[in-house]
């Protein structure tokens, strides 16, 4: 079906045609193929309205649970790494043991008690052999305790600071506490034993042990220093001896090289002289042979059997 159009002449001389049959209010809801277009916003809104809110809640709960589990696993892993770091860093720093002289002291004490010694007796002007043996055993025990006592005293401030700042593991802190308790108990036990041997000795025994320990340490260091000096002196003597031997060997090698060179020169000279003599002898022989051949040739032409002069005449 055709429609009638109206022509409009524009001021510039051009002409346009208006479709009179077109509906100005027509809403184009079809595409080029004639299929109606859907309103996307309206459809999405209808889908959202038809979704159960419980589904969103379940999804949120699952996401929260997954994130929570992930964070906890990460925290635990990080904590284990920190504990492992401190454990590997310190190693067996607080895995302390009492020296063997502790047991040795109690063995000596048992023998003295069986021999009649009683705790609390003053030594007097002349201490008995049992009293002296027991005092020496306790002093040795006290001296041997000095390293672990000073170790705990040195580490105590740092460990307390680390623990207050949560920078040490629980296992490390417990190990430190156990070592500190063991050392403290040993200190008090030594003092109690000292008062049994000599009343009032507990007030000075640790100071005496520290002094003896320093003396022994200095003596040990001096012995090590003397040994090191002795080893250096021996090494210097050995180096000097080696240097002397090397110098003598170098001198011997130089002389031997000269002697060998002279022998080689003389040998070469002898060989050259022999070669000259051989050449001279060979030349003489060749000369004699040449003279002999010449004589033979003359004899052949000038003898009886030779050609006569004028035999053609």
Image (tube, rainbow, N blue to C red):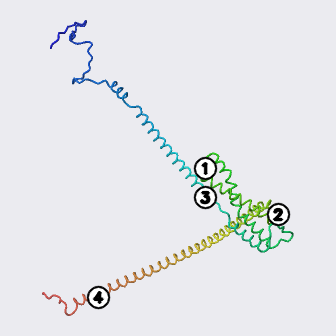
Question: What's the distance in space between the residues labelled 2 and 1, CA to CA?
Answer: 43 Å
Q: Secondary structure under badge 2? A: loop
Circle 4 residue: 292
Residue 76 x/y as whole percent: 52, 47
Check disc 2: other Cα within 10 Å, few if <14, some if 14-19, many if 20+.
some
* Residue 126 left/right relative to 33: right
Pointers 4 and 1 in contact (C-beta within 8 Å): no
Q: Nearer the viewer, residue 195 or 212?
A: 195
Q: Nearer the viewer, residue 103 or 308?
A: 103
Q: Secondary structure under badge 4? A: helix
Residue beneath the point at 60% across and 58% down: 92
Quadrant position of the N terminus in the picture: top left
Residue 68 x/y as whole percent: 49, 41
Circle 2 residue: 199
Q: Quadrant location of residue 243?
A: bottom right
Q: Is residue 177 above or below residue 25?
A: below
**Closer mark to the observer between disc 3 and disc 2:** 2
Q: Is residue 175 above or below residue 300?
A: above
**Closer mark to the observer between disc 4 and disc 1:** 1
Circle 3 residue: 92
* Residue 122 left/right relative to 269: right
Residue 38 x/y as whole percent: 29, 24
Q: Is residue 138 above or below residue 304?
A: above
Q: Quadrant location of residue 244?
A: bottom right
Circle 1 residue: 168
Question: What's the distance in space between the residues labelled 1 and 3, CA to CA?
Answer: 14 Å
Residue beneath the point at 45% across and 37% down: 61
Q: Secondary structure under badge 3? A: loop
Q: Quadrant location of residue 5?
A: top left
Q: Residue most toward the right? A: 125
Identify the mark nearer the N-term, 4 or 1: 1
Q: What is the count of numbered marks?
A: 4
């Amino acid at each position: 079906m055709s429609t009638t159009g109206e022509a409009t002449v524009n001021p510039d001389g051009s002409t346009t045609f208006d479709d009179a049959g077109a509906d100005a209010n027509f809403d184009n809801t079809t595409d080029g193929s004639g299929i109606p277009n859907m309103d996307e916003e309206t459809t999405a809104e209808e889908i959202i309205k038809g979704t159960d809110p419980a589904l969103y809640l379940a999804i949120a709960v699952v996401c929260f649970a997954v994130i929570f589990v992930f964070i906890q696993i990460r925290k635990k892993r990080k904590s284990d790494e920190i504990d492992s770091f401190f454990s590997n860093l310190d190693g067996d720093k607080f895995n302390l043991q009492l020296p063997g002289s502790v047991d040795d002291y109690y063995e000596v004490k048992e023998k003295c008690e069986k021999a009649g010694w009683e705790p609390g007796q003053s030594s007097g002007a002349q201490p008995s052999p049992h009293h002296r043996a027991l005092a020496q055993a306790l002093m040795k025990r006290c001296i041997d305790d000095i390293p672990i006592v000073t170790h705990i005293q040195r580490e105590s401030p740092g460990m307390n600071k680390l623990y207050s700042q949560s920078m040490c593991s629980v296992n490390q802190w417990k190990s430190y506490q156990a070592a500190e308790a063991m050392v403290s108990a040993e200190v008090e036990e030594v003092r109690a034993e000292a008062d049994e041997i000599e009343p009032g000795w507990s007030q000075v025994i640790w100071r005496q042990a520290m002094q003896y320990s320093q003396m022994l340490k200095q003596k040990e260091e001096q012995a090590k220093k003397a040994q090191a000096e002795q080893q250096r002196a021996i090494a210097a003597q050995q180096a000097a001896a080696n240097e002397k031997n090397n110098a003598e060997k170098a001198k011997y090698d130089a002389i031997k090289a000269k002697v060998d060179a002279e022998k080689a020169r003389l040998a070469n000279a002898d060989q050259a002289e022999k070669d000259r003599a051989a050449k001279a002898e060979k030349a003489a022989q060749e000369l004699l042979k040449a003279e002999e051949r010449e004589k033979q040739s003359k004899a052949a032409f000038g003898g009886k059997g030779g050609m006569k002069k004028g035999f053609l005449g």
